[in-house]
């Protein structure tokens, strides 16, 4: 039943697309080529009685060709026995007006099956008169309707082709614009890379020029504050020397941090992947920063899960991440506080989980949101009042991304901060040859 209803709907839609019968009678132009005047008049009268108005009745081929020159017909009724051949006339009319798709009905005086078959094989129609005179209007109307529908479809096709051509032209123009934009972006990207390299070179040169006098300032002020060559009598001079030393160290940290961040952002610090024992890197970091923690009166703990697997990563970058995080934690932890480095395996996620936690001053939600951005400093006081460069955690963030890891910070003001890093077993990318684990 559903199929029957669908077919009915489809038939209804199709019938709406067909021209009305009255429109067919008004629009269709019919050419009658019949040598016999009586027969020609009878055919013309029969079609006029049926409602056809655009009729042209002629007696021979020559007159037919002249009539078609000024007004090509939709349907041609041709006497099959015309002088010169009705089939020849049909071919000439179609050749003269190939865009009309002329419908031809041949008229015969007998019902010879072989003759009818020959005409039908051409793709034309055939009527036997006067026997089929009553059927003539319906047959002409059918051919006219098919012709009008075909003409309408061809017109829609031509219109569609024009629309497609216009849209294709627009698409081609859009593609040309995209290609031009792509070339322009490639040039700009190349220029930006060149400028980044030049900026790095400039920072490196500037760093060298600044570090030389700063190292001298820091070295001499350190010797003075330690009174290596004799005591400083005036206590104020001791304070001045300490300020000079701390300011010099602060400037050195800014220079080194800014250069490192520029190198990372410009992609000038390539990965050096090797087999890495993360436990060993943590122990090295603890040994490296143990003296700083001791001087700050902060306990530095290490908690390492046994039998951790060796991973493929960049050892130097991993150590830099840990050094930055632990140094930052010590800086923000009051005396008698605690900083802990831990690592364990998360087999379900396929990562090693590194955590650096402290019992320091903590951070607010706003601080956590901004702490990874360059040159952002925390709003609260620190343990020692020392100034930072505002680059430590932004460098950590960039390095973590470079290693294909993720970072998460949890903190509570007044209670401390925990930084968790999920470190993949292997840096994403093509397989690389690795060295022995360190």
Image (spheres, grey):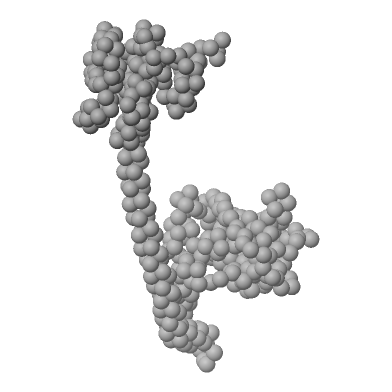
Residue extending farthest to the bottom is 229
Q: Image quadrant for the C terminus?
A: bottom right
- 402 vs 236, nearest the viewer: 402
* Residue 28 in view of the camera: no
Question: For the point 24% across and 21% down, which residue is it?
Answer: 58
Q: Image quadrant for the N terminus?
A: top right
Quadrant of the image occupied by residue 98: top left
Q: Is residue 438 left or right of residue 139?
A: right
Numbered disc total: 0
Q: Is residue 85 left or right of residue 45?
A: right
Question: For the point 34% across and 43% down, which residue is it?
Answer: 165
- 393 vs 424, nearest the viewer: 424
- 203 vs 290, nearest the viewer: 203
Residue extending farthest to the left is 70
Residue 177 percent coordinates (x, y): 34, 55
Residue 346 percent coordinates (x, y): 71, 52
- 323 vs 359, nearest the viewer: 323
Q: Is residue 57 left or right of residue 286?
A: left
Residue 272 percent coordinates (x, y): 62, 71
């Amino acid at each position: 039943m559903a199929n029957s209803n669908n077919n009915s709907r489809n038939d209804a839609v199709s019938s709406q697309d067909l021209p009305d019968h009255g429109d067919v009678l008004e629009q269709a132009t019919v050419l009658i080529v019949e040598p016999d005047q009586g027969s020609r008049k009878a055919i013309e009268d029969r079609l006029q009685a049926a409602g056809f108005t655009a009729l042209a009745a002629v007696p021979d081929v020559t007159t037919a060709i002249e009539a078609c020159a000024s007004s090509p017909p939709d349907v041609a009724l041709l006497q099959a026995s015309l002088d010169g051949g009705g089939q020849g006339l049909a071919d000439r009319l179609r050749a003269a007006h190939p865009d009309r798709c002329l419908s031809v009905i041949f008229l015969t005086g007998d019902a010879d099956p072989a003759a009818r078959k020959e005409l039908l094989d051409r793709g034309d129609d055939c009527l036997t008169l006067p026997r089929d005179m009553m059927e003539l209007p319906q047959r002409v109307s059918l051919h006219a309707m098919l012709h009008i529908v075909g003409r309408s479809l061809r017109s829609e096709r031509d219109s569609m082709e024009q629309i497609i051509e216009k849209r294709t032209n627009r698409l081609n123009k859009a593609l040309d614009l995209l290609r031009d934009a792509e070339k322009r972006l490639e040039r700009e990207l190349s220029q930006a890379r060149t400028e980044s390299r030049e900026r790095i070179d400039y920072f490196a040169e500037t760093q060298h020029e600044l570090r030389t006098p700063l190292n001298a300032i820091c070295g001499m002020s350190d010797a003075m504050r330690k009174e290596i060559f004799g005591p400083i009598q005036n206590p104020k001079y001791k304070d001045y020397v300490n300020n000079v030393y701390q300011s010099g160290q602060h400037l050195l940290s800014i220079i080194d941090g800014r250069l490192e961040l520029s190198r990372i952002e410009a992609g000038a610090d390539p990965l050096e992947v090797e087999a890495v024992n993360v436990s060993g890197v943590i122990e090295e970091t603890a040994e490296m920063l143990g003296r700083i923690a001791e001087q700050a009166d902060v306990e530095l703990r290490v908690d390492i899960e046994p039998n951790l697997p060796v991973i493929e990563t960049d050892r130097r970058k991993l150590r830099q991440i840990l050094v930055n995080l632990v140094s930052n934690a010590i800086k923000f932890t009051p005396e008698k506080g605690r900083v802990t480095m831990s690592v364990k395996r998360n087999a379900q996620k396929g990562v090693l989980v590194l955590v650096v936690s402290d019992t320091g001053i903590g951070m607010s939600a706003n601080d956590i949101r901004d702490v990874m951005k360059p040159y952002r400093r925390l709003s609260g006081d620190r343990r020692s009042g020392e100034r930072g460069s505002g680059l430590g955690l932004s460098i950590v963030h960039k390095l973590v991304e470079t290693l294909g890891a993720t970072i998460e910070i949890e903190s509570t003001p007044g209670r401390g901060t925990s930084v968790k890093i999920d470190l993949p077993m292997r840096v994403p990318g093509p397989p690389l040859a690795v060295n022995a684990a360190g």
